[in-house]
Amino acid sequence: MKPTDRVLAALQSGGVATDILEFPHSTRTAADAAAAVGTTVAQIVKSLVFLADAQPVLVLASGANRVDATKLARAAGVRRIAKANADVVHEVTGFAIGGVPPVGHPRPLPVYIDRDLLGFEIVYAAAGTPTSVFSIAPALLQRLTRGTVADLREESEGQG
Ligand code: 5CA
């Protein structure tokens, strides 16, 4: 199955009716995706894998924010947070960096959601490839992923 089909299947089995938007150019980064869609970087969902006491977790963060490791550790109830490398990201999500979606993984991961995403009516997330995204209401994304909403924003720097 194509990567985008795995995402579409997960959305459909969750009862979410949305189309995958395919672009002729890169949506690999939050900035690229925002430019392609014609929205703000803050409305792009970054799907990031961290190791929380060595267990993989997925963080859905606003494209405008960097994730604060201390806040994530507190939310996850762990001591150590490390960023997963590209191989680990592929292994635990089934997708390559630049296209990692929030849903459609081989095994469900614990999900933590940057509360700033909930301030938007619609957000855009990667749909499995570095040239595709889908739109979704953040409340629906939360329900679909059973994600824990938390303050995860690093305060010192703006863009991530
Ligand atoms: N398609 C876009 C917007 S939806 C996207 O996937 N953005 S993202 O933020 O979710 O994915 C890019 C992120 O992957 C970067 O922010 C960075 O945290 C991570 N990343 C990029 N290169 C590497 C790498 N070599 N190892 C680990 N993580 C990486």
Image (cartoon, rainbow, N blue to C red):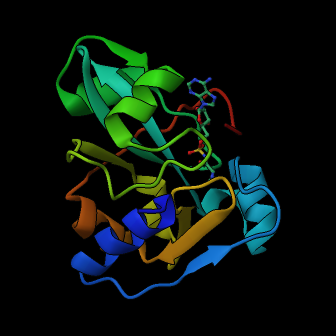
Tally of marks: 0
Image coordinates of residue 90 in percent, x first then y, are 44, 34
Q: From the viewer's perspective, is 143 left or right of 141?
A: left
In this view of the protein, can residue 30 be seen by the observer?
yes
Report the front residue among 112 and 32: 32
Q: From the viewer's perspective, is 10 left or right of 95?
A: left
Q: Quadrant of the C terminus?
A: top right
> Is residue 81 positioned above or below 150 on the image?
above
Image coordinates of residue 151 in percent, x first then y, are 38, 43
Give the residue displayed 17% in from the left and 25% down from the top: 77
Q: From the viewer's perspective, is 85 left or right of 98?
A: left
Quadrant hosting ligand 1: top right
Q: Quadrant of the N terminus?
A: bottom left
Image coordinates of residue 122 in percent, x first then y, are 52, 77
Quarter of the image for residue 53 reads top left
Give the residue displayed 47% in from the left and 27% down from the top: 68
Image coordinates of residue 107 in percent, x first then y, are 20, 45
Quarter of the image for residue 37 reads bottom right
> Is residue 106 positioned above or below 128 on the image?
above
Q: Which residue is most to the bottom?
A: 17
In this view of the protein, can residue 139 be seen by the observer?
no
